[in-house]
């Protein structure tokens, strides 16, 4: 996973179009390789791009799926098997445009392998895939595009309580449309109510749209069990919530990128345009960048929205340059929501009307070994606006900006900092409100209420380096060799590693004492080497 994502949406769109061209370019060679002098048991070979169900002596994809569903021979398609996994492959290449959705039913395990030569399309008229309860489907190496529904869910695919695996697929420009006469319009790319695993796939340009802004989950709406790995969500639109993913079930996201997803609602608010979580979610080794929550009535949680009584854990991840109009440029944690952030960086996130540039918190927020740098809010809480329960341990807040509380704005709620740095924030008040000094903190001004009797150091420059790659999966601020944060923390409250994964505590200044450093970065002592003086 890149530490900073650097690409534009137009460039990505062009790349995806080129990718589709190359995806089909090697069709003849791969199709020839698929031919065989015999048909293995459970193998069904598609020989036409026509969407048909008749007896004209060839095998269409619809006929092949029918043979697998009913375990009979259909037209020229081989008989399916109820026990052995049926595998559908292709000796043709190109686009198959469906005149109606293609339904997979529980006829036994089924693999549909597009071989990187097949695009399935709804022709901007239909849903493309329906997977019925009890089915076991693997969809691989194909494009799913231009599914379209009005007042219904799942433009590209609807998984109805089945088990689905998606590998090396592209879901492009699928759309569900909400109008005043319809109640449903969620899951532009996929609507999942079953068990789904997605790997090495791309979701681009999918939408949950409508005149009033659409509903939930431009890329994916999940109310089942969802695992996503090594995948990209870019340029999707979520209407009211969840441009990339809307989760109301259980989701695990690993090594993924969410970039340039948007939410827009003409009549209501927008929440979580990268990700909107209303269930249980874990995010690791991922990047959310440039997601924007925009609405006439206000946008919240440009990167992530965590809803009421929902649980979100973020580890080894980056939230960069996300925007919201009202609250929570990077993350909005709703009342009674629980967010745990570890070994992660929030940088350059923005709220351009109200509060919480990096994070807006109304629930329970725990931050450990993390960096909030260069986030900004128009009013309060450049780094964090807290209206709930906040605990920060061994973290660094630097260079954040707001009118009040450049680092932290605490609205008379519970906020405790331990072994942490709040410094160089671009405001007259690095902290605003009462911050509980949990001991061994550093602030560059005297607004956080840090007390030297607790081992803390107010009015102290921590001597931080720039935000950069100092090793590990995310960017950090290194400590200068003479930083007062070195070996001045509390070992009893110190995590076992720093943000980069470096073991804590270390002897950072070479005095023989192993003491935890303050902040997200643990200094590795490097003795000064004096070069011999050569006289000429």
Image: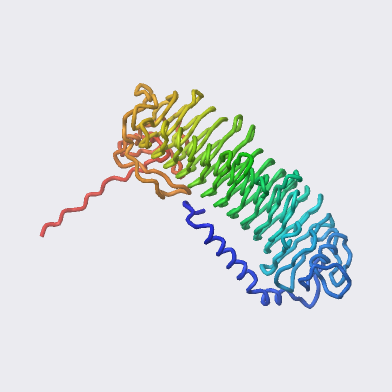
Quadrant holding the C terminus? bottom left
- Rendered view: 324 above or below 229: above
Side of 72 relative to 291 (left or right): right
Indicate the quadrant where residue 94 lies.
bottom right
- Rendered view: 161 above or below 431: below
Closer-to-camera residue (507/212): 212
One can see residue 255 in this view: no
**Total numbered labels:** 0
Residue at point 77% right, 66% down? 88
Side of 337 relative to 181 (left or right): left
Indicate the quadrant where residue 107 lies.
bottom right
Looking at the picture, the colour scheme in use is: rainbow
* Coordinates of residue 213 in the picture (x, y in percent): 65, 46
* Coordinates of residue 23 in the picture (x, y in percent): 63, 69
* Coordinates of residue 63 in the picture (x, y in percent): 83, 66
Closer-to-camera residue (526/194): 194
One can see residue 179 in this view: yes
């Amino acid at each position: 996973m890149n530490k900073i994502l650097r690409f534009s949406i137009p460039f990505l769109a062009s790349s995806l179009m080129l990718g589709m061209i190359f995806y089909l370019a090697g069709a003849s060679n791969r199709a020839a390789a698929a031919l065989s002098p015999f048909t293995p048991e459970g193998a069904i070979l598609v020989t036409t791009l026509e969407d048909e169900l008749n007896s004209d002596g060839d095998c269409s994809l619809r006929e092949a799926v029918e043979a697998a569903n009913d375990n009979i021979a259909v037209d020229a398609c081989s008989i399916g098997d109820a026990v052995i996994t049926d595998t559908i492959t292709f000796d043709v290449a190109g686009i198959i445009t469906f005149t109606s959705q293609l339904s997979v039913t529980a006829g036994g395990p089924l693999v549909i392998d597009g071989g990187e030569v097949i695009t399935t399309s709804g022709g901007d008229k239909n849903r493309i895939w329906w997977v019925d309860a009890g089915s076991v489907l693997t969809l691989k190496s194909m494009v799913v595009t231009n599914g379209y529904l009005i007042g219904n869910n799942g433009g590209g695919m609807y998984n109805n309580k089945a088990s689905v695996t998606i590998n090396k697929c592209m879901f492009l420009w699928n759309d569900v449309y909400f109008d005043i006469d319809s109640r449903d319009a969620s899951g532009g790319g996929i609507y999942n109510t079953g068990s789904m695993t997605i790997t090495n796939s791309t979701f681009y340009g999918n939408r949950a749209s409508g005149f009033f802004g659409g509903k939930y989950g431009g890329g994916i709406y999940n109310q089942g069990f969802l695992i996503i790995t090594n995948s990209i969500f870019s340029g999707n639109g979520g209407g009211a919530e969840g441009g990339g993913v809307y989760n109301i079930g259980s989701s695990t996201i690993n090594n993924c990128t969410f970039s340039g997803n948007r939410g827009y609602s003409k009549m209501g608010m927008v929440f979580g345009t990268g990700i909107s979580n209303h269930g249980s979610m874990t995010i690791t080794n991922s990047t959310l960048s440039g997601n924007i929550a925009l609405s006439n009535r206000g946008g919240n949680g440009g990167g992530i929205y965590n809803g009421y009584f929902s649980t979100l854990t973020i580890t080894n991840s980056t939230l960069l340059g996300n925007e919201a109009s009202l609250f929570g440029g990077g993350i909005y944690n709703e009342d009674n929501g629980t967010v745990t952030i570890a070994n992660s960086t929030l940088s350059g996130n923005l709220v351009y009307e109200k509060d919480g540039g990096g994070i807006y918190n109304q629930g329970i927020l725990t931050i450990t070994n993390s960096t909030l740098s260069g986030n900004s809010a128009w009013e309060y809480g450049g780094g964090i606006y807290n209206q709930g329960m906040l605990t920060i341990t061994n973290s660094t807040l630097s260079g954040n900006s707001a009118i009040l509380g450049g680092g932290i704005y605490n609205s008379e709620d519970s906020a405790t900092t331990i072994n942490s740095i709040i410094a160089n924030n671009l405001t007259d008040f690095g902290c605003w409100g009462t911050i509980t000094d949990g001991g061994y903190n550093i602030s560059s001004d005297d607004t956080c209420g840090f007390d030297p009797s607790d081992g803390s150091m107010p009015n102290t420059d921590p001597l931080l380096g720039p935000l950069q790659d100092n090793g590990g999966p995310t960017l950090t601020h290194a400590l200068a060799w003479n930083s007062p944060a070195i070996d001045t923390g509390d070992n009893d409250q110190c995590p076992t590693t720093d943000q980069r994964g470096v073991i804590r505590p270390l002897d950072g200044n070479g005095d023989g004492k192993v003491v935890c450093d303050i902040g997200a970065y643990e200094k590795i002592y490097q003795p000064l080497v004096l070069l011999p003086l050569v006289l000429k």
